[in-house]
Amino acid sequence: MSTDQTFFGHPRGLATLFFTEMWERFSYYGMRALLLLFLVDTVENGGLGLDEKNGAAIYGLYTMFVYLLALPGGWLADNFFGQRKAVFIGGCLITIGHIFLMIPQPQTFFLGLVIVVLGVGLLKPNISSIVGGLYPASEQTKRDAGFSLFYMGINLGAFIAPLITGYIGEQIAWNYGFGVAGLGMALGLVQYKLTEKHLGDVGLEPTKLDDPIKQAKRDKNIKTVLWIFIIVLITILTLSFSGMIQFDPVLVAGISGVIIFITATLFFAYVLLFEKLTKDEKKKIVVIGVLFVFSALFWSGFEQAGSSLNLFAKRYSDRMFFGWEIPASWFQSVNSIFIIALSPVFAWLWIWLSKKNLVIGTPVKFGIGLIFLGLGFAAVAIASQQIGGGSKPIWMWLILTYFLHTVGELFLSPVGLSAMTKLAPKKLVGQMMGIWFMSTAFGNLIAGLMAGEMDDTAILANPQLMPDLFWFIVKSTVISGTILLLFSKPIRKLMGNIN
């Protein structure tokens, strides 16, 4: 563990992870700001010319797999690579993927998406796990504050990315925008290797078996599975690009949702039945399962920022500002502006409340987060009513929506990351981080599919479709948040000594 306290009173290694994740998020949020707009833009403008349902389904599948692969990525780090090596390999894959995205051909574009997804699946869960490893178990509150600072790094990258990649992609060329997004990850890799020494021995080695013979056998089996996966993936991509198999994005997205639900259920059952956990550890796994459900619901609304809300900004919002039209993708930076401004406030708030013995439990924070998410959609639902009158709502409605969503996010997301590292048994930390990101994957998929309902022709024919969609989200999130608040005490008891 690094004990060099030089980064805002936190271990110096937090700075290494802060900037690595900042540039990885520059890559991801640059992609998120552009992807759906590119997919549904006309071929004449350099887009792929897809309809809303197919474009949104592809967007949802991409953002889903980015987080879904965090589960095997965490497992591979725990059992084979080690978290530090997994972060580096993941960053290399992301950079390579963006090189393919720069080539203006559909086949290379989708190949680039696949490679980027694989890279994020390795990097994302493990860098968060390393953050948790910088703090001893006795410093739970400080760990929460550290994750809040780490989360600010995430959003610094998310703030910069749409402004740069969005402008280049919308105003110059889509593929140039995707290329600049990848440049960020390359910078992050350089910084990571130059400052990795500050991490000490955290995340350096995978979990080892006591028996060297069994360990060697396990390593061999993992290598075999990896080679099989690579061969199968190459075969599927080859058949798809050659036209020998047809790819229906909407159908695949629907099936993927069912698979995620079944996989998560089986995973929790396996952990509870076969991982030889203590009674206290099993209770905490149950809590993780409950948080998984409400996390997925939260992200299904929040992640519409890059899908339905992005289309809302592009097509239906008045984006004029003193005679200049704001690029639609720039609104993807608004959430990050609020995160950067409010993260230090929330980090201070948790410590201040702890000193006053007024600690707010994780279930309560989740419930409040969901309610604020619902209030944000209430704002955009009210704004969308203007479309029926033939006018466009001013862009300030989107600012209000993102502000409320940001408050909800700060109650839920960094606290959720920290809760996973505290609730998970030590040998399962990487996998539990993967489960956390699986809930995000599920939410992203739903967010993408819901954006498919933003069919421009249908909305122009019946403008009430849009506010109806947003009001449905309001009801779902506010009711769910209220239910979680009502059951927060029994959930808190299952958490034992964890706040």
Image (tube, grey):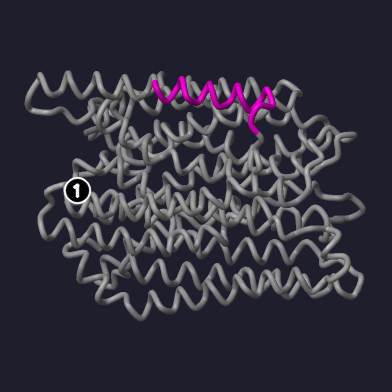
Q: How many marks?
A: 1
Q: Is residue 24 above or below residue 92?
A: below
Location of mark 1 (residue): 425
- Please state the horizontal and vertical placement of residue 193, each as a whole percent of the image: 40, 19
- Please state the horizontal and vertical placement of residue 410, each as a whole percent of the image: 47, 59
User: The residue under label 1 is which amino acid type?
Assistant: Pro
Horizontal side of 279 relative to 23 (left or right) equals left
Residue occupying the far bottom of the picture: 486
Q: Determine the image quadrant of residue 185.
A: top right
- Please state the horizontal and vertical placement of residue 288, each as a whole percent of the image: 30, 58
Looking at the image, which is closer to me, 369 or 44? 44
Residue occupying the far front of the picture: 244
The residue depicted at 47 percent of the width and 43 percent of the height is 67
- Local crowd size for mark 1, using a 10 Å CA cut-off: few (<14), some (14–19), many (≥20): some
The residue depicted at 20 percent of the width and 71 percent of the height is 493
Residue 179 visible in the picture: no
Q: Quadrant of the C terminus?
A: bottom left
- Please state the horizontal and vertical placement of residue 81, each as a whole percent of the image: 30, 24
Horizontal side of 247 relative to 282 (left or right) equals right
Residue range corresponding to the magenta coloring: 228-245
Q: Quadrant of the N terminus?
A: top left
Q: Is residue 390 above or below residue 79?
A: below
Query: For the stretch drawn in magenta, what is the main secondary structure?
Result: helix
Q: Determine the image quadrant of residue 97.
A: top right
Helix, strand or loop status at disc 1: loop
Q: Is residue 282 above or below residue 61?
A: below
